[in-house]
Amino acid sequence: MRDVAIVAFAQTRHTAHDTGLSEPELILPVINEVKERTGLRRFGFTCSGSCDYLAGAPFSFVSALDAIGAWPPISESHVEMDGAWALYEAWVRLQHGDVDSALVYGFGKSSLGDLRTIMTLQLDPYYLAPLGLDQLSYAALQAAALRADRAELDEIVRRSRADGRDNPYALDLPDEISGSDEVSGSDEVSGSDEVSGGFAVEPLKTSDIAPVTDGAAAVVLAAGDLAAELCERPAHIRGIAHRTEPHYLGMRDLAQSASAADAARAAGVGKGPVDVAELHAQFAHEELILRRALELPDGTVINPSGGPLAANPVMATGLIRIGEAARRVHDGTAERAVAHAAGGPCLQHNLVTVLEA
Amino acid sequence: MANRCAVIGVGQTHYTTKRGDVSIAGLVREAAIRALDDAGLTFKDIDAVVIGKAPDLFEGVMMPEAYLADALGAAGKPMMRVHTAGSVGGSTGLVGASLVQGGVHDRVLVVAFEKQSESNATWALSTHLPFNASLVVGAGGYFAPHIREYMRRTGAPAHIGTLVAVKDRLNALKNPYAHLKIPGIDRRMVESTPMLWEPIRYLETCPSSDGACAMVLSSEAKVTGTPAWVHGAAMRSEPIFRAGRDTVNPRAGKDCAADVYRQAGVTDPRRQIDVAEVYVPFSWYEPMWLENLGFAADGEGWKLTESGATALDGDIPWNASGGVLSSNPIGASGLIRFAEAALQVRGMAGEHQVDGARLALGHAYGGGAQFFAMWIVGRERP
Amino acid sequence: METSETSEPLVARHVLEFPGGYTRTTGPVIGRFLTELRAGRIVGVRTAEGRVLVPPLEYDPASGEPVADGYVEVGPAGTVTASAWVREPRDGHPLDRPFAWAVIRLDGADTSLVHAVDAGSPKALAPGTRVWPVWRQQRQGHITDISHFAPEVTRIVSPIRPEYRIQAGGALRTFLDGIRRGVFLGGRCATCDKVYVPYRASCPECGSAIDQRVELPDTGTITTFAINNLPDPRAPEVPFVSAYILLDGADVPMIALVGGVPAHEVRQGMRVRAEWVPESERALSMANVRWFTPTGEEDAELS
C-alpha cells in the first residue's frame, strides 16, 4: 500500500458542559491549528464524522463545511460514524495515488441531550430499542459477562484520570473514585452513596463510565514525500483495518471482542513491539477486553492521554485516539504505537491502526 | 494511478409509498440479494459493505448500519456508513468504488436505502432547532427561489418544467421498479395541479418512497458477468453561505463534472455521453443541470429540454428510468442514478434501455445544491 | 469569541418526537415472532446450519445468508448468562422499580435474547439462574408483550423522544443580541472584504476568523423568493412569501418572510424594510422581525 502518514493533530480543550458554541465554531480553531502546523490551506481530500442525533437536528455536518474554508469547492465526504472512520476513508482515497494530502475531522456535543438514552436509538428497532435498553445498561451487561476484577477496574480509572489531569485537553476528574462521583453527568447517580455503593447499573460503577464531553479534533494525512516535508517525525500508517460483528448482544460472546481481534490481526499489531496504545474504551472493562483482543504486551503504555475515561467527545473520541498515538510518535516518545476506535453497542465495530516513526 | 473498478451486479427493490411487508433489514436485503444474484455471488464473496442513507430521523434509528451490518453479511468484515445529505446515494457508490480503486478490496457491496414511511419526510426535515436565524421551509421552499432566479436569468418559458414532469413519468411507465406510474400523463394534467412552492407545481416534485438499491463493485481480477467499468468518479462540496455564491449554477457542480469528464476523456458531454441519470427532484432542475453539467451553454438548457433531446428517443436521454421525479427513497436516490447508468451500459435496462449506450453519467446532489457526486461508467474497459 | 452583551443564558428545550411514534413494518420473520408472542409463545428460527436463533432474524448473523423456513418453539424458560442491575430505572425502561437486564438463553435456543428480569435484588441473579417470562395481560405483538422475566418458582409502536437543551452561544448569540436591540449585526471578513449576515465566527470562503462587526441597516432588496402554499407555523397564513433578502451593505442574502403585500405582487428586485415588533415585546429571537415589507422605492437592478 502507499505510504501515508499522520503529520498533524489538533483537538479542542474538551468540556463537560455546553459552552454555547455551535459545532462549526467548535471545529474552526482545530482546523486552523492543523492548517497552520502544516502550512497547507488546501487538501486533496476532506472527510468528517459526526452524528445527527447528538446534535438534535438532521444534516448537522452541513454547516461545518462553512467553517473550513471550502472554496474553491473541495473533494469532500462525510461518515455518520466516529471521525476515525473518516480517517480510514481518507486513507483509502490517498491510496489512489492522485492526491497527496487529506484533512479529517470529527466533532460532537454529547451535552445537549441525554447521551445514555440517545444511544438506545442505535439498537435494533424491534427487539432492543423498544425495551429502552440504555447505554449504561448494555455496557453493564458486557461488564457482567466479563466478570472483571473490581480492583483492576478501579486501577484503570485512577490511572486514566491521573493521566487526564496531566493532559491539558482532557477533563480534570478527581482521584477519589469510591463514592458517587458526579463525573458522568449530574443525573447519573442521584441516590446516596451508601445505598448505591457507587454503582450506576451494577456491576458498572459510576467511575467506570466515560464522562459526557463536548469536543472536536482534526488530523492531516500526507502521502509519500509530502509527509517528510510537513512533519519532522511523521507517524506512518503501517496498518489500518476495521471489522464489525453481529449486532444482537445475545448472539455474541460479550466477554470478548472478536472483531477487535480480527482488526488487530489485519492491521499487523503483533508484528512488532507496541510502545503506546490508545484504546477507545468508554467503560473501564472495555479496556480489559481490548487489551486481550489486541494481544498487547504487558509493557505497552495504555492511554497515556487519559483516554476516553478522561474525555469522551463522542464522534471525535476514536479519531483522538489515533491523533494521540500519532503525537507520541511525533514527539519521539514512541517508535511504534497502536490506536483503536470503536462503534456500535458493546464494541460491535472496531478499527485498529498501527503507527510507526 | 487508481485500480480499475467495475459494477458487476445491480439490485433494486420496487419503489412505493409504503413497503408494509418488510422490516428495514428485509428491505435492504432484498436489494442486496438481487445485486448478488445479478453478479452470480453470495455474501461470502464480498470483502466489505458500504451503507448509505439520508438523515437517521427518517426511520428513528440512529446509525442503523450497526443494526444492519449482519443483515448485509458484514459480520467479520469492514463496514462503512456514508451520509452526505441528498447526494448520499452517489457518495455511497463512490466510497465503495474508492475501496476497489485504492486496491484495498476486490469486491464491495454498496447499499443505500430509505424507508420514509416509518415517519414523514416533511416532519424530519422541519425539526428546526431553537434560535434559527433564517427561515427555511422544506426542500421545495428552499429550491423554489433558485428556480425562479433561473427563469429570470434565462427567460425560459413557464412550461419547460411541465415538459420534464411529463417526460420523466412517461419513462417511469417503462421501468418496473418505478414508484409513480401515471398512465396518460400529459402537460394539461401537470398544469392542472396546484402550486406548492411557486413556481413548483405538485406534479413537478418528487414522491416520497420506500426503497433500497444495491450494487456489487469489483476489481478487474474478480469481474463476473457483464461489467460496467468506472471511467471517472468525483465528489465536490462548497459552503452554503459564501458571499456571491451562484445557487442556480453552483461552481461545485461544474468542478465535479469537469473532474469526472477529465478522468473519462469526455470533452463534449452532449455528444460523447449516451445517456445520463441526473438527480432532478424538481422538474426545473433538468434545464438547470443541463447547463451546470455542460450539456448546454449557459442560458440554453431549457431549449435542449424543449427540443426533446433529453427524451428517451432524443439524442441525449436524461433519466430514462423515470428519475427522482418518479421514485425517491431519498438516501437511495443517488445510488439509483449510479446503478441505472451502469444498467444502461451493461445493456440490461430492459424496456427503458437506450439503444447502444456505451458511456453513461450518474449524478447526485444534496444540501443547498452544494454537495455533488458523479461517476461515468462505460461498456469498454478504460 | 466575543462575549454577549448580557450574561443571561439563552437556552431552550428542543424535542425530536415524530407524532404518534414511528410505524415500523416488521417483515415476515420479526412479524411471526411478535405474532407468536401475542399468542403467548416464543419461537426461534432455524439457520441453514441448524442453529436456532432467538429472537429470530431473517438472516444468519454470522454469514448474512437467509434462514431456513423453520420456526421452533423455545422456552418459555431460560438460563441467565449475564445480568446487570438497574438501581434507578429510566423513563423508557420496562419496569419502574429496580430490576436486572439479563442475557437469557431460552431452552432450545442457540443464541440469547436480552430482556428485563424482576429479580428483587442484584444477588438473586447469578449466571445460571433459571428465569420464566411474565406475560402482559393485553398483548399486542410487541417485544414488551413479555412484561419481563422472573426467576424460576420463587415468583411493544416505538415512541422516540430524545430531548435536548440547546444553547445559542457564540456568533449566533451575538447576532440575536443585536436583533433584540433592533439591529442586524454582520461581520466583515478582512481577507475577502465581504460582509456576512447573520454575524458569524468564520468566513465560508477562506475559513479565516471574522472579528470585525458591522451594523447593517434594516433595508434591503429581494433577490429571489418562493410563494409557499403549504402552511408553516412560522407564517401567519398561506400563501406566504419566503425570500432571499440582501440587506444593504451585506454580501449574502438572508431568508425571511415578506409581508404587508399580496404574495403575487412580490418581485425580484423589490426594496424592503424589516418590520420590527414593538420594543416592549422584543426577545433574543428572530421573531422580533415580523417580516420584511415593501418600502415603496423603485426596484433595484439585479445582476
Image (tube, helix red, strand yellow):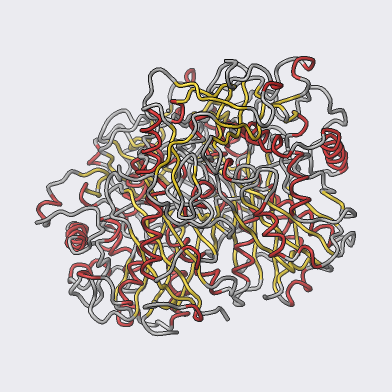
All told, the count of numbered labels is 0
Is A33 or A306 nearer to us in this picture?
A: A306
Q: Position of residue B186 (x, y in %)?
A: 11, 57
What residue is at 78 percent from the left and 39 percent from the top? A310
What residue is at 72 percent from the left and 58 percent from the top? A34
Is residue C275 at least partly visible in the picture?
A: no
Q: Quadrant of residue B166?
A: bottom left
Q: Position of residue B257 (x, y in %)?
A: 43, 71
- Quadrant assignment for the N terminus of chain A: bottom right
Is B159 or C98 nearer to us in this picture?
A: C98
Left or right of A160 in this view: A2: left
Left or right of B374 in this view: A89: right
Q: Quadrant of residue C111?
A: top right
Compared with residue B295, is residue A256 higher up or lower down, i.e. above or below? above
Q: Position of residue B245 (x, y in %)?
A: 46, 58
- Quadrant assignment for the C terminus of chain A: bottom right
Is B315 or A152 nearer to us in this picture?
A: A152
Compared with residue B85, is residue B257 higher up or lower down, i.e. above or below? below
Is A133 or B203 nearer to us in this picture?
A: A133
What residue is at 57 percent from the left and 21 percent from the top? C150
Compared with residue B243, is residue C92 higher up or lower down, i.e. above or below? above
Q: Position of residue A169 (x, y in %)?
A: 79, 44
Is residue A230 at least partly visible in the picture?
A: yes
What residue is at 11 percent from the left and 51 percent from the top? B189
Compared with residue A144, is residue B91 higher up or lower down, i.e. above or below? below
